[in-house]
Structures are given as C-alpha cells and as structure tokens.
Image (cartoon, rainbow, N blue to C red):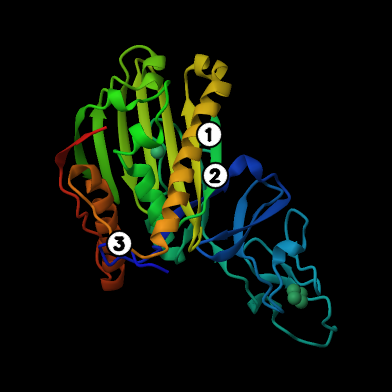
C-alpha cells in the first residue's frame, strides 16, 4: 500500500462516519453484505424499518452471516443455525442440549454504529463512544428525513486518496470533462474563490457560480452556491435560486485498499428539474465515468511509485486534504481535540 503522497498520513481514518449505502435499496426484512474499509459488514433492515450493521462473520466458524437467513428480527447462520439479534448478541445455538449451560448471550458479533438520514445509511468505523460524539454529515438546506431526488453510484478502481484528490481537483475540468455542453479549453479563465475552515474540512464560501457552466445557467435566476469538503471524503454543494434549493452530497467510501465507491446524491425542490431527470442523470453519469476513467489511467503510472507534485493554488485543496487527515490521525493518537489546519484564504487558478 502506498503512503499518502508528500505527507505522512494514514491510508484510512477510523472514528469517522462513512456513507455505506442508499437507504431505499435495503427493504425491511432484507440484508446486504458489503466490504467497507476492508471490513466485511452485514447491513440489515429489521421489520420495524431500523437498520443495523454487524461484522459479517459468524463467531462459530467464520462463515459470512449474510450467507444465512434473516427473518426481520434475527440473522440465522447457514452453517449450524446460530442466531443473532440486531445488537449482535447470540440468541440461539440449536446444537446445545438442555443440560449444557452455555451463556449464549455472552457470544457477540461486533456491531457497528449506524445512522440513517437524508435517505443515506452511514456507518461509523470506530468505537461507539466516538460515534456518539461525532455528528453524521449533514445535507445543507434539507431536513434529515428528506428523500434523495437522485442517486448515482460508481466504483473507482483506485485508493481513496486518488479518488478524493481527483474529485476535488479544480483544474481538470477543461481536460477531463471537456465537451461542447460543459467546458472547452477556450472557455478557461482565471478564478478566485474564498475558502474558510469548516467542520473537519473547508468551505468554498457562498458565491455566484462560474458563468461558463451551462448547468448553472439552466437553473435560471441568480444562483448562489456553497461547497464544503469534510473528512473522510464528503463533499456537499448547496445551490439556492430564489426560494428554491438544490443540494448534492458526494461521498467517497473506501471498500478495499485499491477500490472505493463514489456516490452522488441529489436533492432539489424545483419541480421542473424532475422533468429533466433523464438529462441530469446522463450528465451525472458522464461526469463520474470521466473522473473514473482518468483515475484508472493514473493507476498505471502510480504503479511505478513516482514522486508527485502539489503545485500552487490549484493543488491547495489536495494539500489541505492531506493535512486534515494527518491532523485528525494525530489528534486521535494524542487523545486531544482536532485543530483544523486550514486557514481562510482566497485561492486563484485557471480552469
Ligand atoms: S459457522 Fe455459524 S453457526 Fe456454525
Ligand atoms: Fe471531475
């Protein structure tokens, strides 16, 4: 595994919320297995609609519990029928005879803290006390029970850092996303955006978006946008146009050391965008595919472990990302509060 480039930060951060899956894909009484940060996790939604997550390994002989059955209350292992409830506590071992006094409630499967809001299921990879003290990333301008208007998911065959840095990179647009309907090289111009530190990250403060972006013009009126990034790899964007609002949350969740899942979830209040959903979906998929293609090509080069550069303002957000990771890991290791290393400033680049 390569170390984070230029700055000595861990590959993965623990004690943070990671977006696990869209809630609507997990129906009551169903379970779903997923590897997150290399850990096998079983997600299930019980008969009451509550989601829980357990380590997807039977403590008896290690078979994934997700190979078994779920009745809406308990998961039954497919090998010898041991049963576990939503807290991960063993409730039945069918092979025991009546006189074998085993305290089965002491047999536990690891339970992960989960939270469901804005239609997304989040998992906390870390300890329970830290989960309670860490807020779940918010979607600005929408209540926690708001349902997503659209969700797009793609797996990128690259480490977390390459995906995060690739998606936050402000200078690749005219090259990676070049197209007649979005940006051309000729439309490149100098930009200056004000940034400020914010919870576990930084924010590009509220401003009127770039005049060369067709999608913003589509919105009509005078849109204003605010973009925030926070650890571990969560970007939110809020666009307001008069009384209407649009929000997007992009989450990057590492699955294994060399793959991660990008999910873009959108919320809006404008009824007319719903009519344009097929078009929007096409744009969103095209963008994600272009980003995925470029980081995939990049892996061929990175396999040779070259030294890399983070140059001037166009790469400052990437620099901040590595600094944030490093500081987060350090603060945890030293048992102290996180001190945001980002200082408010204006970044200038051409794109
Ligand atoms: S392996 Fe799960 S019950 Fe035996
Ligand atoms: Fe991109």
Give the mark, 3 or 1, whose residue is nearer the N terminus.
3
The image quarter in which residue 53 lies: bottom right
Label 3 element class: loop
Residue under label 3, please give it.
5
Image spot of residue 33 (x, y percent): 65, 58
**Crowding at mark 3 (Cα within 10 Å: few <14, some 14-19, many 20+):** some
| Quadrant (top left, top right, bottom left, bottom right) of the C terminus | top left
- Residue sitting at x 42%, y 50%: 163
Give the residue pinned by disc 1. Answer: 285
Q: Quadrant of ligand 1?
A: bottom right
Query: Mark 3 or mark 2, which has the lower sequence index?
Result: 3
Residue 47: percent from left, percent from top:
72, 48
Look at the image and tell me whether residue 132 can be seen: no
The answer to whether residue 272 of the structure is visible from this angle is yes
Circles 1 and 2, Cβ within 8 Å, touching? The answer is yes
**Measured Cα–Cα span from mark 1 to mark 2:** 9 Å
Residue where numbered disc 2 is placed: 154
Name the residue located 65 percent from the left edge and 43 percent from the top edge.
Answer: 25
Q: Which residue: 26% across, 72% down? A: 334
């Amino acid at each position: 595994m390569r170390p984070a480039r230029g700055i000595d930060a861990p590959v993965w951060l623990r004690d943070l919320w990671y977006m696990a899956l869209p809630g609507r894909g997990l129906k009551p009484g169903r379970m779903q297995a997923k590897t997150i940060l290399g850990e096998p996790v079983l997600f299930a939604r019980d008969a009451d609609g509550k989601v829980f997550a357990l380590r997807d390994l039977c403590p008896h002989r290690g078979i994934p519990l997700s190979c078994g059955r779920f009745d809406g209350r308990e998961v039954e292992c497919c090998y010898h029928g041991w049963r576990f409830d939503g807290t991960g506590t063993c409730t039945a071992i069918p092979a025991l005879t009546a006189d074998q006094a085993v305290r089965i409630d002491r047999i536990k499967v690891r339970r992960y803290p989960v939270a469901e809001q804005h239609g997304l299921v989040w998992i906390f990879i870390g300890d329970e006390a830290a989960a309670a003290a860490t807020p779940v990333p918010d979607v600005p301008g929408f209540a926690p029970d708001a349902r997503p208007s659209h969700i797009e998911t793609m797996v990128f065959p690259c480490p977390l850092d390459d995906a995060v840095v690739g998606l936050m990179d402000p200078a690749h647009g005219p090259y990676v996303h070049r197209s007649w309907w979005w940006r051309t090289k000729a439309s490149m111009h100098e930009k200056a955006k004000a940034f400020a530190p914010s919870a576990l990250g930084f924010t590009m403060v509220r401003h009127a978006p770039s005049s060369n972006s067709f999608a913003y013009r589509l919105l009509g009126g005078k849109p204003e946008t605010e973009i925030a990034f926070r650890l571990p790899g969560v970007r939110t964007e809020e666009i307001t146009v008069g009384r209407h609002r649009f929000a997007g949350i992009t989450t990057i969740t590492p699955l294994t050391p060399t793959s991660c899942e990008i999910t873009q979830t959108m919320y809006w209040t404008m009824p007319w965008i719903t009519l344009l959903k097929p078009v929007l979906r096409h744009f969103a998929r095209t963008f994600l595919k272009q980003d995925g293609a470029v980081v995939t090509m990049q892996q061929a080069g990175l396999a040779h472990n070259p030294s890399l550069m983070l140059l001037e303002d166009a790469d400052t957000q990437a620099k901040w990302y590595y600094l944030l990771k490093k500081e987060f890991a350090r603060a945890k290791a030293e048992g102290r509060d996180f001190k945001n290393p980002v200082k408010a400033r204006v970044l200038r680049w051409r794109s």
